[in-house]
Image: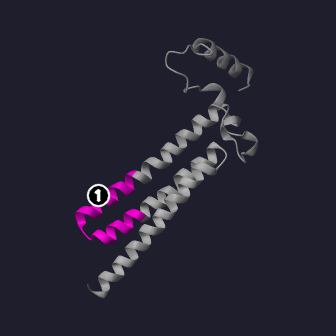
C-alpha cells in the first residue's frame, strides 16, 4: 500500500465521517426543533451537505469512473429535489396555519394575499369555499373601485 493511497483513504474517511455527522445533526434537528420551518431547515441544509460529503468520500475511496458518475448523479438529484420539496412543505404549512406568523421577519404571502386567494391544498372532491364566478366578480368589483 503506497503513501498516496493511504492518504486518499484518510481523506475519504474524513469526508465520510463529516458527512455522517452532518446527517446525524439533521436527524437530531428534525426531532428536537419546535416548529415546521426550523425542522424543514434542519432537514435540508445539513442533510444535503452531509450527503454531498458522503458522495465525495465515496468517490475518493472507490476511485472508479463508473462509481464516481453514479455518486455524482445521486448528488445532483439530491441538490435538485431537497430545496423544491422544502419549498412546497413550507407553502403548505403556511397555508394550513402551522407557521407562527409573528416570528416571520418578512411575510410576503400575507401581504400579497396569496394565502387568501389561492387554496390549492383542499381535496379535489371538496366544494370550493367561494365559487369561481363569485371570486371573479369580487376581483372585478375591487379593480373597478381601485382596491385590491
Start and end of the magenta stretch? 54-77
Residue 3 lies in the magenta-colored region: no
User: Is 79 on the left or on the right of 139, as rendered?
Assistant: left
User: What residue is shown at x 59% (from left), y 53% (from top)?
Assistant: 29
The foreground one among 97 and 10 is 10
Vertical placement of residue 52 versus 30, above or below = below
The foreground one among 78 and 105 is 78
Counting other residues with Cα less than 10 Å from the Cα at mark 1, is it few (<14), some (14-19), or many (20 or more)? few
Q: Secondary structure at mark 1?
A: helix
Residue 103 image-quadrant placement: top right
Residue 17 image-quadrant placement: bottom left
Which residue has dot 1 on it?
70
Vertical placement of residue 137 versus 110, above or below = above
User: What residue is shown at x 64% (from left), y 30% (from top)?
Assistant: 115
User: Is 117 on the left or on the right of 80, as rendered?
Assistant: right
User: What residue is shown at x 73% (from left), y 24% (from top)?
Assistant: 146
User: Is 58 on the left or on the right of 86, as rendered?
Assistant: left
Pick the quarter of the image with the N terminus: bottom left
Pick the quarter of the image with the C terminus: top right
The secondary structure making up most of the magenta span is helix
In the image as oriented, which residue stretches furthest toward the right?
A: 102
User: What residue is shown at x 63% (from left), y 51% (from top)?
Assistant: 32
User: Is 3 on the left or on the right of 109, as rendered?
Assistant: left
The foreground one among 140 and 40 is 40
* Residue 18 rendering spot, x and y as whole percentages: 48, 68
Vertical placement of residue 30 versus 138, above or below = below
Looking at the rendered structure, the number of numbered marks drawn on it comes to 1
* Residue 44 rendering spot, x and y as whole percentages: 52, 52
Residue 72 lies in the magenta-colored region: yes
Vertical placement of residue 66 versus 29, above or below = below
Amino acid at each position: 500500500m503506497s503513501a498516496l493511497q493511504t492518504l486518499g483513504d484518510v481523506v475519504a474517511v474524513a469526508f465520510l465521517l463529516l458527512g455522517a455527522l452532518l446527517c446525524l445533526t439533521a436527524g437530531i434537528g428534525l426531532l428536537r426543533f419546535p416548529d415546521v420551518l426550523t425542522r424543514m431547515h434542519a432537514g435540508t441544509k445539513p442533510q444535503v451537505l452531509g450527503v454531498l460529503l458522503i458522495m465525495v468520500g465515496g468517490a475518493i475511496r472507490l476511485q472508479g469512473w463508473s462509481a464516481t458518475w453514479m455518486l455524482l448523479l445521486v448528488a445532483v438529484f439530491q441538490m435538485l429535489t431537497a430545496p423544491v420539496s422544502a419549498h412546497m412543505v413550507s407553502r403548505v404549512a403556511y397555508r394550513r396555519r402551522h407557521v407562527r406568523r409573528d416570528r416571520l421577519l418578512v411575510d410576503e404571502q400575507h401581504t400579497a394575499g396569496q394565502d387568501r386567494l389561492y387554496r390549492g391544498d383542499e381535496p379535489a372532491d371538496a366544494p370550493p369555499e367561494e365559487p369561481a364566478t363569485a371570486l371573479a366578480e369580487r376581483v372585478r368589483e375591487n379593480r373597478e373601485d381601485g382596491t385590491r
